[in-house]
Image (spheres, rainbow, N blue to C red):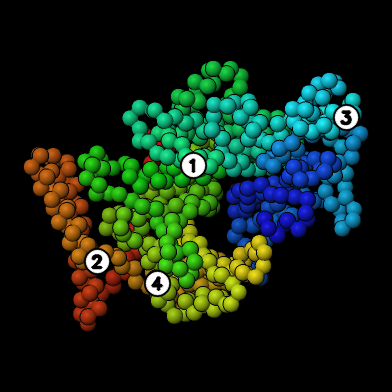
Amino acid sequence: MQTQTSSGYYTYSNAKATIYNNKLVYVAGREIDNNSQGDIYTHGYGAVIVNATETDEAGNIKYVLRDFENTKIAEPRIYYGTKENLAIAVSNKKDEFDYPKGATENETYSYDGEGGIQLNFFDKSCVAIAKGNLGLMFSGKDSKILLNRNIIERAEQIMPYLMYDEKPYLVISGDGKLYWVIDAYTVANEYPYSQKTKIVYRNSTKEINYIRNSVKVIIDAFDGTTNFFITDKTDPIAMVYNNMYEGLFKDISELDESISKNFTYSEFLYNIQAEMLCLYHGITPDVLYRGNDIWEIASFSGLTSSTAYKKIEPYYSVIKDEKSNEIQMGLITAYNLYGKESLNAYLVGTVDSGKNILELHKFTGDSIVLGLRQLENLIEQDETISAEVSSLNVTGTRISKEMMIIPVKNTLIYVVPIYQTSLNEVNSVPVLKKVIVASGNKVAIGANVAEAIEKLLSPDKAVSVEVEDNSTVEGLIDSIIKANNNLEESNSSGDWAQMGRDIEALQTLIKQLESIRENDKNANGGENENTNVTNDIVVNMGTTIGNNVN
């Protein structure tokens, strides 16, 4: 939201992805950090909505909503938020700064909400001393004091036994009001028979072996009304709290659907689950013991000129539920087998009726699915595409990229946005310059997603590539030897079920070795055959993994 900071009054909350008019957008609350402002600057105003899939002709972000007036938000004022750390005095007789109408003119407002408490002079004096703001002491007799305006601190004051997400997000209800959503977690570090892991929370490391996002906290941005909703009644810890504090928690069915439909899968929880699934992804104990099926999160080079790799960060995308055919917001990441480059699976986190749903989609064992590093190599090897990308790398700029994989029915679409950032400007904003898309054995580049997809579908403008397994002959031979040792072990122990799995794994490796030898033969002038492999995907739509780490 750097392009909005020129107003001088405002700071912006964490931009959160959501679906608005069937389009993917980012929403950020426009708040005032009154720690550095005068007494009249009491509240933020409205929200900024940015289109996540479209840019203007120059590649800059495209706003859906940015104006102060005609916002279509019935109550746009934010008195409770992520930046509001000071207690304030408000009165229906006091003019507060509302929003700028022009270069020299400001609109004013007097608070008339339900928030705050009325106090006598003695109580005001006590609050003023406790909060370090003597101005509260001399506020008018009809004034109200607004306390605990930081929403995370407010939730903690009410229920200190939950862990709260550090990135609350703003949603717009059906009646045009602004509400904050905080993901709250039940955690433990001594849950029976569960793997421990370390997380970073509030700049400190914490060890846990159980976590669930079973509670959503909804806070009215205007008057501070705070409600706790249980989304998962199978969580034993959440239900204990529910029984202990009668009346505090409400059932998610009581929440306005216009709010709950904007829930998104928690990134904090998703990152923990995604890492744990590298090892624990539904495999049998003997395979787990042998370490034959370890995954890693797919990685790529973040800078176009860099050889250093970084893990793909989870990203939100609009996906379509194959059962209901409805548009959903999905959080996605991808995996490959440890030490390999071709993709092995991808993970999708969605929310349905307030409940988190995590689905793991695995590819068949003999599929060759284009990996992120492999796609990077193909882009660099193609003269046309690499030339267009290199032309952006001019003096005084830095070129960077992201990589995303979008599941569409039974195939994958790879999207690679290329950004240009000026090095000569303070807080320079990356500008989208090119977009590369790929699917199956075709790659194309365009000025934006629409143009790139149009070229991808055109036989004359798309580039054909061969997707091959990156495994070397030597590496496959080592894997075959290990697989054969596993087979001998299961044979000697009389484990017939494991023997069948070991034979299948051995046969898959031998087929991969045969495929590589055949490719080498064709490359050396042998009989040419079609070696392109389509993305055969096995989608386990019914697989749901619980939110606990165990």
Q: Upstream in the sequence, badge 3 or badge 1?
A: 3
Most extreme residue toward the left, as rendered? 492
Q: State the separation of the CA atoms marked 1 and 2.
A: 38 Å
Please, what is the three-letter code of the amino acid marked with disc 4? Leu
The C terminus: image quadrant = top left
Q: Upstream in the sequence, badge 3 or badge 4?
A: 3
Name the residue nearer the viewer: 149 or 72.
Answer: 149
Which mark is nearer the camera, 3 or 2? 3
Which mark is nearer the camera, 1 or 4? 1
Which mark is nearer the camera, 3 or 1? 3
Residue at position x 40%, y 76% in the image: 381
How many other residues sit within 10 Å of disc 3, few (<14), some (14-19) or many (≥20)?
few
Please, what is the three-letter code of the amino acid marked with disc 1? Val
Q: Which residue is mark 1?
A: 200
How many other residues sit within 10 Å of disc 1, few (<14), some (14-19) or many (≥20)?
few
Q: State the separation of the CA atoms marked 3 and 2.
A: 78 Å
Q: Which residue is mark 3?
A: 138
Residue 108 picture location, percent across and down: 88, 44
Which mark is nearer the camera, 2 or 4? 2
Q: State the separation of the CA atoms marked 3 and 1.
A: 43 Å
Circle 2 sits in a helix, a strand or a loop, which is it? loop
Q: Which residue is mark 4?
A: 378
Residue at position x 85%, y 41% in the image: 40
Does the image show residue 507? no
Residue 491 picture location, percent across and down: 9, 44
Q: Upstream in the sequence, badge 1 or badge 2?
A: 1
Q: Is residue 120 above or below residue 31?
A: above
Name the residue nearer the viewer: 368 or 328.
Answer: 368
Circle 3 sits in a helix, a strand or a loop, which is it? helix
Circle 4 sits in a helix, a strand or a loop, which is it? helix
Circle 1 sits in a helix, a strand or a loop, which is it? strand
